[in-house]
Image: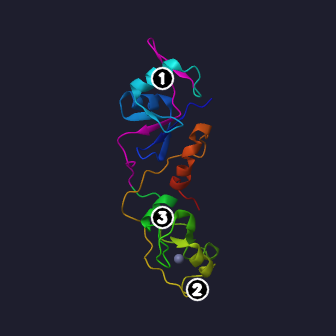
């Protein structure tokens, strides 16, 4: 049984997976709180108290001489909105944020579901999946442009695509080998948004 613990930042974005030892130590030191399936949070003493009353825990218990404590499935860090990362990761959320949730061709603002990631130089022509060649585009503009260069489609980009200089929300440092737990599923939307996009 895996006793990995999903780590959220204080905005409840999934940012990391850690082992239970580190999770309990963050909890004990007051740097993190346990998050349950109803999004309730518990500090160390509340969690320890609750642990005495429950008989089953997905990931088991740790027993000390005086008490037992359940290994949490999910914890949230208290101090960080953002991960201390050195550069902006190439993730969907960061790309959408960078372009202000606007279509880079018509300039209108959209909901995330109405925006696509668009290769300026089409992939079929060797365009890369990178900050320099990916912009946000609405579905109408996407359909209009098709598999062509903007100038071929008579379209003009409103911005110069580039890598942003701000530090984005914490990005997930997931290895491909991690095992997704059922209890993490309500947080996996964040995985989609914060995972680095691979070509
Ligand atoms: Zn558009």
Residue bearing the label numbered 1: 50
Camera-side residue: 116 or 109? Answer: 109
Q: Which residue lies most toward the top here?
A: 65
Mark 2 or mark 3: name the one nearer the start of the chain.
3
Q: In the rendered image, is residue 91 in sight?
A: no
Question: Is the Cβ of the residue at disc 2 closer than 8 Å to that at disc 3?
Answer: no
Identify which residue is drawn at 48% across, 64% down: 96
Horizontal and vertical percent for residue 139? 59, 73
The residue lying at 56 percent from left, 47 percent from top is 188
Measure how far apart labels 1 and 3 are at the Cα level.
40 Å
Q: Earlier in the sequence, mark 1 or mark 3?
A: 1
Residue occupying image coordinates x 39% and y 51%: 85
Write down the residue under mark 3: 96
**Which of marks 2 and 1 precedes in the sequence?**
1
Residues in magenta, as a range? 60-86
Task: Look at the image and say whether residue 80 sits in the magenta stretch.
Answer: yes
Q: Position of residue 88 (x, y in %)?
A: 42, 58
Secondary-structure class at tag 2: loop
Q: Is residue 63 magenta?
A: yes
Q: Nearer the viewer, residue 68 or 84?
A: 68
Judge whether 109 appears above or below 45 on screen.
Answer: below
Where residue 6 sits: x, y (%)?
A: 51, 39
Q: CA distance from mark 2 to mark 3?
A: 23 Å
Q: Secondary structure at mark 3?
A: helix
Vertical arrangement, residue 141 with respect to residue 84, above or below:
below
Circles 1 and 3: CB atoms closer than 8 Å: no
Q: Is residue 39 above or below residue 21?
A: below
Q: Which residue is mark 2?
A: 153
Is 34 placed left or right of 188 in the picture? left
Q: Nearer the viewer, residue 46 or 100?
A: 46
The answer to which image quadrant residue 77 occupies is: top left
């Amino acid at each position: 049984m895996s006793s990995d613990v999903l780590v959220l930042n204080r905005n409840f974005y999934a940012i990391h997976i850690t082992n239970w030892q580190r999770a309990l130590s963050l909890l004990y030191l007051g740097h993190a709180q346990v998050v349950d399936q109803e999004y309730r949070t518990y500090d160390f003493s509340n969690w320890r108290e609750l642990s005495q009353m429950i008989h089953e825990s997905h990931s088991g218990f740790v027993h000390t001489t005086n008490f037992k404590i359940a290994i949490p499935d999910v914890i949230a860090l208290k101090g960080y909105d953002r991960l201390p990362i050195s550069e902006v990761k190439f993730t969907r959320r960061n790309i959408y944020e960078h372009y202000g949730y606007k279509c880079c061709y018509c300039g209108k603002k959209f909901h995330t579901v109405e925006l696509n990631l668009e290769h300026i130089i089409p992939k079929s022509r060797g365009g890369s999946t990178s900050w320099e060649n990916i912009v946000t585009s609405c579905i109408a503009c996407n359909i209009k442009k098709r598999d062509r260069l903007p100038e071929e489609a008579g379209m003009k980009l409103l911005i110069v695509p580039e890598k942003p200089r701000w530090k984005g929300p914490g990005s997930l440092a997931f290895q491909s080998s991690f095992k997704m737990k059922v209890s993490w599923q309500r947080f996996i939307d964040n995985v989609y948004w914060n995972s680095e996009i691979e070509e």
